[in-house]
Every structure is written in structure tokens, then in C-alpha cells.
Image (cartoon, grey):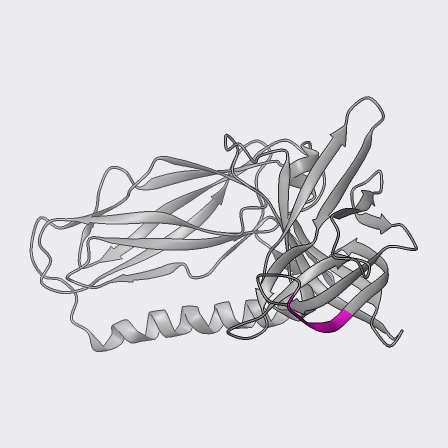
Amino acid sequence: MKYVKLFALAAGAFMLTACSDDNDFNSASDVTVEMAKSEITVKENAGTFNVPVKVTGDPNGPVKVKIVVEASASNPALPFEEKEGKWSGNYIITSETINIPADEKTANVEISTVDDLEENPDRSFTIRIESAEGATIGSAATTVVILKDNDSVPYEKVQGTWNFSFNDYDGNPASWTMTIGGYDEGSKEYGNELYLSGLLGYQNELSLKFYNDEATGECYIEMELPEPFMWYNESYLIYALNGMSTAPGAIRGTFSEDLKTITFDPEATIVYYVAAQDISDALGVYDLSSNMSMTRQ
């Protein structure tokens, strides 16, 4: 996956650079290009985010901007790249060349974070406009990007991509790639609620309760079932049940000490049940997951 992603990014960079060859750049005077923000802070599990670039003036043609990334003096964030056969780093930049059409006043440097799953001090790097065609570089030529560590907070550390292994309805081993997501700091759900996406191999959301007992150090999630999580057709939903019962019940998953694995009771089973919004009107069992475990990817 990493190789595919990086190849796609490289191809995108080539396309962005090449498309400007057929255009005449802005020739109007008093057109400047700058970074729109002096500093941006994101969590290291943020995924993809944008750093804005702005154009002032009235250009009569496109503006091409070349940016460079500079490491900070203390605890610098590093680009995600291969060294001696091993991939490591903290961020990926989609392209260092930004083409801004004449009728646009803003553009973005697209960046993706790479979560290291380890506690560490916040890291940072600087994006600087190195050159511009069709504009002069203004005084605000840099943005400092701070990657805020999230791994000291269990609620945030458990968010990300997981491998969900189980036995299906026929008892055959199977697995899905799942995502545990959370809510923004300051919201009422933060620290208490999560959601699980990827059941049955589709994009959907199943609610999770999150518990972190600081006294015992135990950290776990609970699925409060039954809960509908996706449509089967126009009339019926797929519910997650606790076993073969439609009665309320919870399935608990307990995190390992390093928060990289989740174990479930060996007897726990999620049954995927097709029923109408009135759950008593049902078509029956679609599939199930037993002998479940989850491992962080």
C-alpha cells in the first residue's frame, strides 16, 4: 500500500508540474504569493490536511509556486521515505509544486501525517515558498507545521487502522481492515465514544463506548447491541446483534497494555441480522463473526 501511495503521489506531482507548461503565467504587476498562516498545529493521526497558500492582486494568468520543506532545529518531523530497505518518517507531501489558476486566490499544500504509535515530544517542520512564476514572494513566506503527539492519550492512540480477524458463519477464518475513529477534543463524545468502520468490508459506522480505568490501567471498548449500521436494501437494515438475541447486550473488547491488540471473550459473537426498522420484521442472519480479535496495523 505504501508503495502504491507514493507512486500515485509522484505521478500527481508530475501531472501538476506538466500542466503548467501549456499556460502563460501572470504578467500583471503587484501580484504576490504568500503562505496564508504562520503556524498550523495538527495531531499526528490527523491523516490528510491542507496548508493554505494565498495570492493577492489581480493576476491575468496562472501562478506557479515551488515550496521546500525545512526541518526544525529541535525534534524535527521527517519525511516518510525508505532508508536501507525500511520505511519511516512523519509526513508525506503530495506535491511541492502548486499551480494556481488566474481566477483563484488560494491553493493548498496537501500533507498526510504518518502516525508512529509511540509517545514522543511534538515534532515540527517548516514549509517555505522557494520560488514563484507569475508573482513575487511576499513577506509571509513560511508556515511552521507542528505535529502534536497523540500517543500519550489512550483515547487518541487507539484511533486508526486495525485488522479484524474472526471466523465467519461457516466457521472459516476471515478478516477485514477496520478503522476506529473518534471525536474532536472539546466535544461531548471526546474520551467516551468511538466508532468502528468497515464491518462486512463496507464503509459504515458502529458505535463504541470507550473506557479507560486509570486506577487499574484497564482500557476497553463496548459495543452496545443491537444496532443497525448499514442498509441491506431500500426496506431492510443490517443490525449487529449480541449473539442470536435481539435483546440489548454488550460485547466487550479489552486492549493490551500497549494498545495494539484487542481481545474479546471467546464466546462472544456478533451476528449480522437483516431486519426492518421494526426489528421484529426480519429476513434472517446475513453472516456472523466469532472467535474475534483485532490487531493494530
Q: Is residue 297 left or right of residue 141?
A: right
Residue 194 sits in quarter:
top right
Q: Residue 120 in the image: x percent, y percent? A: 68, 34
For the C terminus, give its image quadrant: bottom right
Secondary structure mostly seen in magenta is strand
Vertical arrangement, residue 154 with respect to residue 180, above or below: above
Q: Is residue 65 left or right of residue 184?
A: left
Vertical arrangement, residue 229 with respect to residue 160, above or below: below
Q: Is residue 165 left or right of residue 75?
A: right
Which residues fall within the magenta stretch? 281-287
Residue beneath the point at 63% across and 70% down: 3
Name, please, the residue furthest toward the top: 215
Residue beneath the point at 77% across and 61% down: 164
For the N terminus, give its image quadrant: bottom right
Front in this rendered view, residue 143 or 216: 216
Q: Residue 13 in the image: x percent, y percent? A: 42, 68
Vertical arrangement, residue 91 with respect to residue 200, above or below: above
The mark total stands at 0
Vertical arrangement, residue 196 with respect to residue 44, above or below: below
Front in this rendered view, residue 235 or 6: 235
Name, please, the residue furthest toward the front: 280
Front in this rendered view, residue 51 or 173: 173
